[in-house]
Image: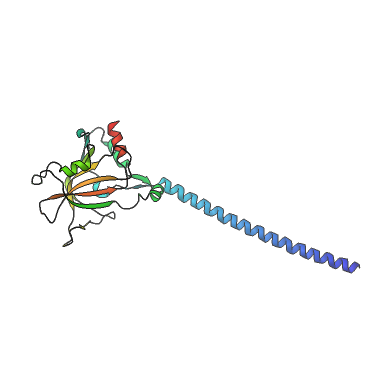
Amino acid sequence: MTDTVKHSDNVNHILDSVSDKIIAKRKLKKTIIYSVILSVVVVLSSVIIMLASINANLQPNFLQGADAYRVYISNVEKSYIDEDSKNYEKFLEEYNGQFYTSILAGMFTGRLSAYEIQETNTQFYSNNAEKSGMSSTLKSELGSNYIKLIFNQERNVLNKNGSIYYSKEYTKDQYELKFKDCYLKLDSEDTDTMTFYLGTQDPDWGNKTVITKIVVKASSFGLYEYFTA
């Protein structure tokens, strides 16, 4: 009888020991899982914070650094701004600020994608021979609030990666789109895009200058407010 009791105690002891080991292993497994989850959360949080703090510049590089800017509000020239102007730095800060967005916000809104280049055969100037004035179409699309970007030297339209953009409309040969005159439409309400209007040479018409639009996923509303405040 005593031997039977001892044997039973030994069995219970072994079962308790095995049970303790199983419980310990489960606890260890849970601890490891929780540690891994916590590590992933910490890493993801760090990545999110980093993406939220780093800004992306959406401004096409070939449109940066204009030599001067003429601002028109209600079709009246409001300001002429160049590097000698007192408000030049303040204006540039406001102007360039319209193109910045956090990488995180850009990922969710799709703003990080490349700007869109839209070629047209619509006349840019009202007097094409003298390359002066705005065509009726350009006036209509710009509205009464806009900025004329002044470039002293002719520039190439470029792809987002910095390579030269070749006309998609003229396919007989590689034709570079070049421009000097450029307008930015100022929207009087917040929008998802802003549009630049460039005067580029039409290869099929020789001396005809046509409208090429550059559509950027940013808003010019802040600039409108800046000049109408």
**Residue 85 % position (x, y):** 22, 34
Give the quadrant of the C terminus.
top left
On the picture, is 7 further left or further right than 228?
A: right
**Which scheme is used to colour this image of the protein?**
rainbow
Task: Determine if residue 222 is in view.
Answer: yes
Quadrant of residue 8 within the rendered picture: bottom right
The spot of residue 114 in percent (x, y) is: 31, 53
- Is residue 111 or residue 85 the one in the foreground? 111
Q: Quadrant of the N terminus?
A: bottom right
Residue 18 in the image, given as x and y percentages of width and height: 74, 64
- Farthest left residue? 129
| 157 over 74 or under it: above or below | below
Where's residue 94, x and y in %? 31, 38
Spot the residue most to the top.
229
Residue 24 or residue 187, whichever sits in front? 187
Quarter-wise, where is residue 69 in the image? top left
Residue at image position (66%, 60%) is: 26
Residue at horizontal 52%, vertical 51%?
42
Determine if residue 151 is in view: no
> Would residue 41 be found to the left or right of residue 13 on screen?
left
Q: How many marks?
A: 0
**In this view, 29 is above or below 180:** below
What residue is rendered at 36% in x and 45% in y? Answer: 101
